[in-house]
Image (spheres, rainbow, N blue to C red):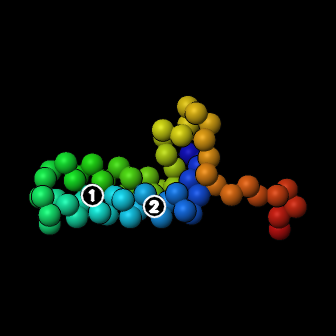
Amino acid sequence: MKLNMGKVDRAVRFVVGAVLIALVFVGPQTPWGWIGVIPLATALIGWCPAYLPFGISTCAKRSDNAA
């Protein structure tokens, strides 16, 4: 499993996931908020399986001369 998510992508997913989960406890209190577990989990592990078939990666490119 190779990381395929950059810092900004992970931060956005973390915030969106946390907000969706918060909707379970406050606001409309709908169980649909548990769908926020998916973006939260992908943000924590840094790998998105949906990016794989499309070859998408939001990670910063590292140069070959990096120490």
Q: Is residue 45 visible to the viewer in this orientation of the structure? A: yes
Q: Please name the residue shown 22% across and 53% down the image.
A: 33
Residue 27 in the image, given as x and y percentages of width and height: 14, 63
Q: Is residue 3 visible to the viewer in this orientation of the structure? A: no
Q: Secondary structure at mark 1?
A: helix
Q: Please name the residue shown 48% across and 64% down the image.
A: 11
Q: What is the count of numbered marks?
A: 2
23 relative position to 16: left or right: left
Q: CA distance from mark 2 to mark 1?
A: 12 Å
Residue type at tag 1: Leu
**Which residue is outermost to the left?**
29
Q: Please name the residue shown 49% across and 60% down the image.
A: 10
Looking at marks 2 and 1 on the same chain, the residue that comes earlier in the sequence is marked by 2
How busy is the neighbourhood of tag 2: few (under 14 within 10 Å), some, or many (20 plus)? some
Q: Which residue is mark 2?
A: 12
Rendering quarter of residue 14: bottom left
Rendering quarter of residue 28: bottom left
64 vs 33, nearest the viewer: 33
Residue 22, above or below 45: below
Q: Which residue is mark 1?
A: 20
